Image: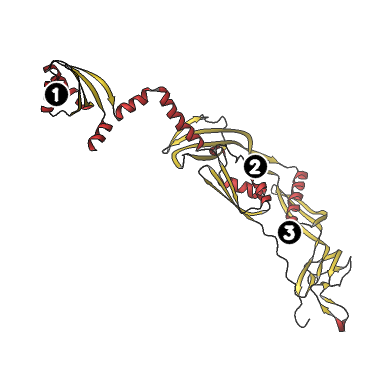
Amino acid sequence: MKEYIRELFSGYVRIKVVGSYTELFINRCIEYGIPIWNIKRIDEQTIVLSLYISDIRRIRPHLKRTRCKVRIHERKGFPFMVQRIVTSRGFLAGVIGSILLILILSNMVWAISVNGASPEVEHKLRKAAYELGIKKGKFIFQLPTNQEIQQELSESLKEVTWIGVKRNGTSYHFQVVQKQLPEKEPAADPRHIVAKKKAVITKMYVEEGQAKVKENAYVKPGQLLISGFIGKEEKSQLVPARGKVYGRTWYVSSVDIPLNSSFVTHTGESKTNYSFRVYGFNIPIWGFKAPDFKHYEVNERETNFRFLKWQLPISISFKHMLETKEVERTYTNKEAVDAALTVAREDIKDKTAEDAEIKTEKILHEKVENGKVNVKIHFEVIEEIGKNIPIVQGD
């Protein structure tokens, strides 16, 4: 077995020895320790035998002494197999082509799975993922990162609480946690609805309970709006007051807007560099020249190549450069006041409920000082002003 392995990996030849003293040649090989085997006589002056490649030079002096000539009949073993592969262009091209094909297929998306989603949400998720480029046959290095995919999908799907994104080889796996429908509210304890701020009542809807104020009435914080007592005093009952009370409220907002300011913005011009990273070394392949613009913002992304289930120490890197410029912005007094109004409106929206409505706005004070316009604005807002308070024993 040991000799067979040596023959296979070292390589050997079948040679044809021709001469009058072939037996003498065999005896000299044995005498000088040259391994020969599988000896076969063809005729009186010709024999065929096997010999290691490394011993071919050793037999030359013995051929001269025995007046024999030699001719290689067959070549066998691993070295000759490799030589045939290298010299065979068709076979070599096939091997290289197969490796490249496997490499390409190992870096494409071939499976997308979604867990934890209802059929409707799964359909929406797959559609949103398709719009991001996550589809079968797409190169993985052309796709956004898992964090970017997760952010985009979370923003586009309002039905989910959380989306987990995982890439395993050529597959993308999405784990979805859907929003739970609100559970049916338990029976409420007896309560009143009182005013939570100063207001003038504009309208009210009473579902349960007894109204204690009328429209156009002025109320103060804590004043009773809808009572949880219903019926006459001797036969009154306690109920959880329900309803909505809207009132006219007032806010004053003060905003400072600089007349002159600067900020950095993108111009729309961009340049992308592509490079291979092999064992930590960068090899530029496209767009390696410096950009024509001086100021820019850089976004880099790197994706590793895979071969079947193995991750290779080779990656492709994208360096996206976005041109930026510093812009000086100058407001006139009127433009600064308009900008202040916009900021103040957003501030009021943050302080009130979504259904609140700004009815009127009035500039109380406008002053230019230290390169800024200071604007004080009065807002009149229609919003819900009621809040629930429990009815305690003894009320």
Name the mark nearer the viewer: 1 or 2.
Answer: 1
At label 3, which amino acid type do we have? Lys
- What is the CA distance from the residue labelled 2 to the residue labelled 3? 29 Å
Q: In terms of image quadrants, where is residue 129?
A: top right
- Tell me if residue 93 comes above or below residue 156 in the rendering: above
Give the left or right position of residue 248, taking residue 130 as reference: right
Q: Which residue is mark 2?
A: 262
Q: Which residue is mark 1?
A: 26
- What is the CA distance from the residue labelled 1 to the residue labelled 3? 107 Å
Residue at position x 65%, y 47% in the image: 125
Name the mark nearer the viewer: 2 or 3.
Answer: 3
Label 1 secondary element = helix
Report x, y in % for residue 255.
Answer: 72, 53
At label 1, which amino acid type do we have? Ile
Q: Which residue is mark 3?
A: 351
Q: In terms of image quadrants, where is residue 313?
A: top left
